[in-house]
Amino acid sequence: MIHIELANCLDMMYMRKLKYLAIALTLVEVILVSWLVYDVLIARESASAYSCLPVYDVARGDGSYSPSYGPSPQATHSVDDSYLAGRWGANKIEAPRAWQITRGDQSVIVAVLDTGINKDNQDLAGMVVIEVNFTDSPTSDDVYGHGTHMAGTIAAIAPECRLMNVKVADDMGKCQPSVVARGIIWAVDHGAKVINLSLAMVGSRDLEEAVNYAWSHGAILIAAAGNKGTSDPSYPAYYDDCLAVAGTNENNSLALLSSHGDWVDVSAPGFNIYSELPRNQYGYKTGTSAAGAHVSGVAALVFSIAEDTNGNGAVNDEVRWAIENSCTPVGDDDMGRGLVNAYGAVTKATPPISF
């Protein structure tokens, strides 16, 4: 009897240990899966890393640039209700209402400094007017899928703008500050009015000088705040001459992993954003890259109607002022002036009617 009770006791102790072990293993599994999801989101969302890879300044294998496939003067990008149905971000910032005033203008070129743009996408065909490849990739096309997604969001908001494909991130989504700096200068020198920087990295003297160069030459630079989920600065967003953008979700709260802080200027939709992908595919991305693309689209709209009110020979300062001073408050100081509002921005920039 004693042996049976002892055996039963040992069995109970053994089962209890197995139960605790199972709980511990489950907790470890949850932690590992959480970290895996975090890593995948970071890796897939943004060209945020940088590496020491060789770069080339050519747009094609023959060493030439390729502006030959631009749109005709009559070409426009059509946007209907079905196209916007899944793009909650464009609706949230009141882009359709802004189109009552302007849909953009072909004279406004938005440079997308990223992993390239798949210019053959049915919704982007004819919008890319010039491209260049600063990476070691054999193509200026988008293999990674990030740049096309950003370009699609910009085009959805400013349907009559034109796009400049400046490939500064390789086919794994990696780039380095010196290459981004060269891309910024090239974009400005080739007519870009808006520069979309949906990437984050360490700062460098070359990068800051390129940002300052672009601003002083009349361009506005829109930069993602980064996806660290902290208030640590990200570059180039942290530079004064960049408009730093945090990401929001559909409830106007901070999006998953979005960086934030008193250095952020504005916020924009950056959670589950639907847009174009290479090979005529579509998909969702979460992060401040998409938030930045929304603001670049708004900047393109404002650029199409802004005037030089202070007589300094440029309108990028008026464009930035209109964007920052028309935001919808979101109640969080770490998210800048608030949620960007396309209708409010173009309204502030609309010249007064003369009689």
Image (cartoon, rainbow, N blue to C red):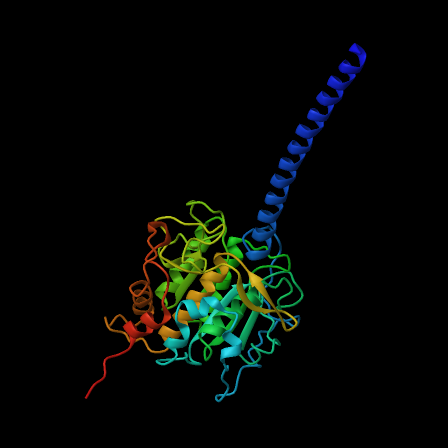
Q: Position of residue 107 (x, y in %)?
A: 42, 80
Q: Is residue 318 above or below residue 265?
A: below
Q: Is residue 285 visible?
A: yes
Q: Nearer the viewer, residue 303 or 61?
A: 303
At 40% from the left edge and 70% from the top edge, which residue is drawn?
298
Q: Nearer the viewer, residue 8 or 295?
A: 8
Q: Is residue 190 visible?
A: no
Q: Position of residue 239 (x, y in %)?
A: 38, 53
Q: Nearer the viewer, residue 311 or 49?
A: 49
| Residue 313 falls left or right of residue 288 | left
Q: Position of residue 254 (x, y in %)?
A: 43, 53
| Residue 7 falls left or right of residue 292 | right
Q: Quadrant of the N terminus?
A: top right
Q: Quadrant of the C terminus?
A: bottom left
| Residue 136 falls left or right of residue 291 | right
Q: Nearer the viewer, residue 3 or 284?
A: 3
At 65% from the left edge and 39% from the top edge, which residue is drawn?
29
Which residue is the extreme one toward the left? 355
Task: Give the quarter of the image for residue 98.
Answer: bottom left
Q: Position of residue 335 (x, y in %)?
A: 37, 53
Which residue is the extreme one toward the top? 2
Q: Is residue 261 above or below residue 166?
A: above
